[in-house]
Amino acid sequence: MNGLQRYNAMLDGRPADFVPRIPILMRFAAEHIGAAYGDFCSRAEVKAEGNMRCADDFGLDLVGVMSDPYSETEGFGGEIVFKSDATPECVHPPLADSRDLDALPRPNPREATRMRVVLDTIRRYRAAVAGSLTILGWVEGPLAEAADLRGVQQMLMDVVDDPEWCCELMDICTDVAIEFAAAQIEAGADTIGIGDALASQVSPRFYLQYIQPRQRRLAEAIRARGGRTRMHICGNMTHLLPSLAEVPLDVVDVDHMVDITTVRETLPDRVALGCNIDPVAGVMHGNPASIRDAISEIYRRVGNPYLINAGCEIPPGTPAENLRALCEPLEYRS
């Protein structure tokens, strides 16, 4: 089996030769090819090279487009500053000083600069690895993108003070995410990740009433266009799991602070869970033997469908032998 066949078999409930490997690589991938991180984030050829080289060198079953949360934000009018060796910064969110949603630009994914970089990266993958590796696109979730446009602190205050206005903003963000996801699928992505990290910071009630319906609409739209769906919520999302179970997802990333057996017991059996080994303590500062033991033990506990990952991004500076150990073939167990 090649990587795409292996991934599809696992998600479709069919036996695979071994467990698919889908770790998140961002700064690690740039570091691996000796590229400045600002170039990795802003230039499609650099991002594609870094991810494809890592796929070859470490045995990954996917390539992706993740680098930072501001691809859509730039299209909405955010001012983004790129740094050589750090994550880009949005120095002025478009809604930092205004609540006028009518004045907020609506980005066209095929024209906005950074969104076009994502589409170009996917097209490069399609030309090089289509049919052999899974191609992961990415959009920001409703609350995450709203916070990027407003500022995290201000958005969390707005959630309390004016939830209806927040809903209007999140609806705009969801509409743009649907358009962006569709463009990525058209360009060659087979799976679209949804990053909604800030959702872990709200109450179960607020999540169910205001965020989950928009995540569900986004996931349904991705599926309607033929894409698979992957959810990534950083932090402790345990309190969200009962409501998250109603979002049509194929893959859920599980952060290391979440009990993965609770996730398996709460989400539908068909949802593939990413191994949630701690990316710093477990991967970066672990050793090959401890990493192999950890991913195998988690697999024993949760069973299929299962994917080799870490709780979040593999940090830069992780020893190459540790990532190789994470991505060593793990025998499929029925």
Image: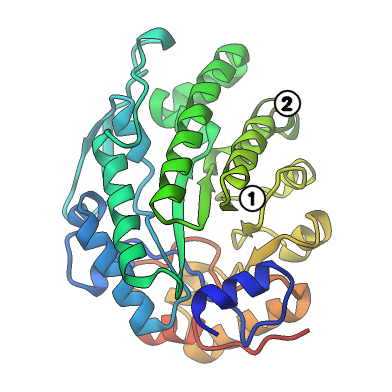
The numbered dot on residue 209 is 2
x, y (%) of residue 200? Answer: 61, 42
Q: Residues within 10 Å of mark 1 (few under 14, many from 20)?
A: some
What residue do we see at 67% from left, 67% from top?
Answer: 11
Q: Nearer the viewer, residue 96 or 184?
A: 184
Judge left or right: residue 233 versus residue 248.
left
From the top left corner, tell me how far across and down residue 87 is, in percent.
29, 50
Q: Is residue 108 visible?
A: yes
In which quadrant of the rendered view does residue 208 lie?
top right
Q: Secondary structure at mark 2?
A: helix
Using the image as rendered, state which of residue 134 and residue 201 is in the foreground. Answer: 134
The mark total stands at 2
| Residue depicted at x 75% and y 29% | 205
| Residue sitting at the far right | 265
Q: Is residue 132 above or below residue 333?
A: above
Q: Nearer the viewer, mark 1 or mark 2?
A: 2
Tag on residue 52? none
Point out residue 121 in the picture as x, y percentages from the top left corner: 30, 56
Give the quarter of the image for residue 104: top left
Q: Position of residue 119 (x, y in %)?
A: 33, 48
Compared with 97, 62 (above or below) is: below
Crowd around label 2: few <14 · some 14–19 · many ≥20 (10 Å): few
The three-letter code of the residue at mark 2 reads Gln
Q: What residue is shown with label 1?
A: 236
Q: Quadrant of the N terminus?
A: bottom right
**On the picture, is 143 further left or further right than 88?**
right
From what the image shows, is residue 216 above or below residue 128? above
Q: CA distance from mark 1 to mark 2?
A: 19 Å
User: Label 1 sits on what residue type?
Assistant: Asn
Residue 4 against residue 334 in the figure, above or below: above
The disc, 1 or 2, on the residue closer to the chain's N-terminal end is: 2
